Image (spheres, rainbow, N blue to C red):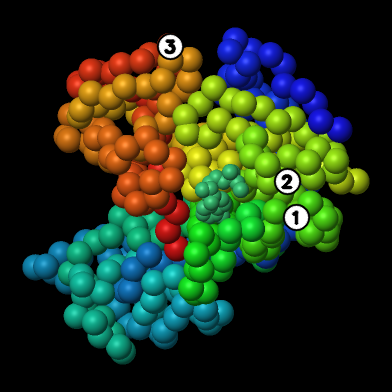
Amino acid sequence: MTVPTSPAPGGLRSVDEHLQQVLSAVHPLGLLELPLLDAYGCVLGHPLVASAALPRFDNSSMDGYAVRSADVARASPEAPVTLPVVGDIAAGSSSGLTVQPGLTARIMTGAPMPPGADAVVPLEWTDGGLAQVRIARAPDPGAYVRRAGEDVHAGQQVLPAGTLLGAPQIALLAALGHPRVAVHPPPRVVVISTGTELVEPGTPPGPGQVVDANGYALAAAAYEAGAVPYRVGIVADDPRRLTEVIEDHLIQADVVVTSAGVSVGAYDVVKDVLGRLGDVTFARVAMQPGMPQAFGTIGPDATPVFGLPGNPVSALVSFEVFVRPALRRMLGAEPLGRPQVLAAMATAITSPPGKRQYVRVRVEHDGSSWVAAPIGGSGSHLLAPMAVANGLAVVPESVTAVAAGQTLTTWLLERRTR
Ligand code: AMP
Ligand code: MG
């Protein structure tokens, strides 16, 4: 079914209204237990409650000698105290050694404290003796001992549900003994490039042919958003073929993203096909770039589908504005949008009336404030400046001219690295 767009001034719908429709149709994916590393970049489904203490046992924080602190309380460089060494305690050992009064044991970092001892004398305070050791400084009781439970006590909530899992959080899960963790899994994004003119990179384009940039761009953008992309490839402007490909891939999709074929051209087949597969809205959104937008749900599971415009910059900006927030919501991650700063424009720019413009900028912090330099023109086929940009400055609908020095909300397009 094709739902006609609600008429907004000038027949356009606002960016906010379209985003609202998108966000009201997507929800965090149901929790799934993933191996720890597969959960990187995902969001914790339940609070993490420690089932054990950390450290799990009292252990030495230095290589040195485990002592009864009272035995060496008078040790000084002038009057060192000499103690017999009863044995070695290595990390991982369960030596069964006890330190009796007047004795000591050599101990390594991370090794369990032997019963009897209440402090560690660092190696550097001694002569390093093996049979007996001269100790030239007195440790305080408890010195260089890492106490069981001083990091985490058993039963303690250490991370709330909703925590984004990066390296330190994954370290904590591992340290507490979890090989797997329940998270909102990364959404699987099926990416389809439509257009009879398209060829694969590596195939020399014939007359009038264009190499598919969008399929790669959108798959990479999905990856950058924390999702798992699946690039299906190129589908010609043939309604039957496009229907087949979408139906074949729905089973593995949490989201379908297509590019091109949503404007008013004679061969814009995405419009026909999506309209027949589900409940999809075709909107003219008051933005530049990226005016034609399709969004809705298709198939038996009401899978969200985005029909993005074909020009590569329009496709990528549309992804930032609509698809990324939807994927973040499915991941259960906050905030949905990119980090934002207020940046002063390095040069004056103009903007079409009644449209929200996303200006590709090179944005930098000059030590005291953010400055954004617009790069390239506003043409939505201009891919090279997009590849140099690291931000999008947002010109509100009502603004048609921005003077140099004027500030605009600017999104920081940080790249995910690995
Ligand atoms: P359309 O939305 O089908 O009217 O396409 C708009 C413009 O984007 C046309 O110039 C297309 O050739 C171009 N285009 C469409 N799909 C892609 C793609 N996957 N990669 C690069 N350019 C594309
Ligand atoms: Mg086309």
Q: How many marks?
A: 3
Circle 3 — which element?
loop
First in sequence: mark 2 or mark 1? 1
Compared with residue 349, is residue 366 higher up or lower down, i.e. above or below? below
- Up the image or down, 398 lies above or below 255; here it is above
Q: Tell which circle, 1 or 3, labels the residue nearer the N-terminal end.
A: 1
Q: Quadrant of the C terminus?
A: bottom left
Q: Is residue 149 left or right of residue 28?
A: left
Tell me the tag on residue 238. Answer: 1
Q: Secondary structure at mark 1?
A: loop
Residue 394: where, in percent of width, then height?
A: 40, 26
Name which residue lies at 24% across and 61% down. 138
Measure the C-alpha gap from mark 3 to mark 2.
Answer: 33 Å
Residue 144 lies in what quarter of the image?
bottom left
C-alpha distance separating marks 1 and 3 = 40 Å
**Residue 382 on image: x %, y %:** 38, 46
Mark nearest the camera among 3 and 2 is 2
Of residue 125 and residue 249, the one placed in the foreground of this image is: 249
Name which quarter of the figure residue 343 lies in: top left
Q: Which residue is mark 2?
A: 269
Q: Amino acid at mark 2?
A: Val
- Residue drawn at x 50%, y 40% is 314
190 or 342: nearer the viewer: 190
Name the residue located 26 percent from the left edge and 74 percent from the top edge: 123
> Where residue 330 appears, x then y in whole percent?
68, 42
The vertical placement of 53 against 160, above or below, is below
Type of amino acid under label 1: Asp
Disc 3 marks which residue? 398
- The extreme left residue here reads 78
Q: Residue at x 42, y 58 (%)?
A: 417
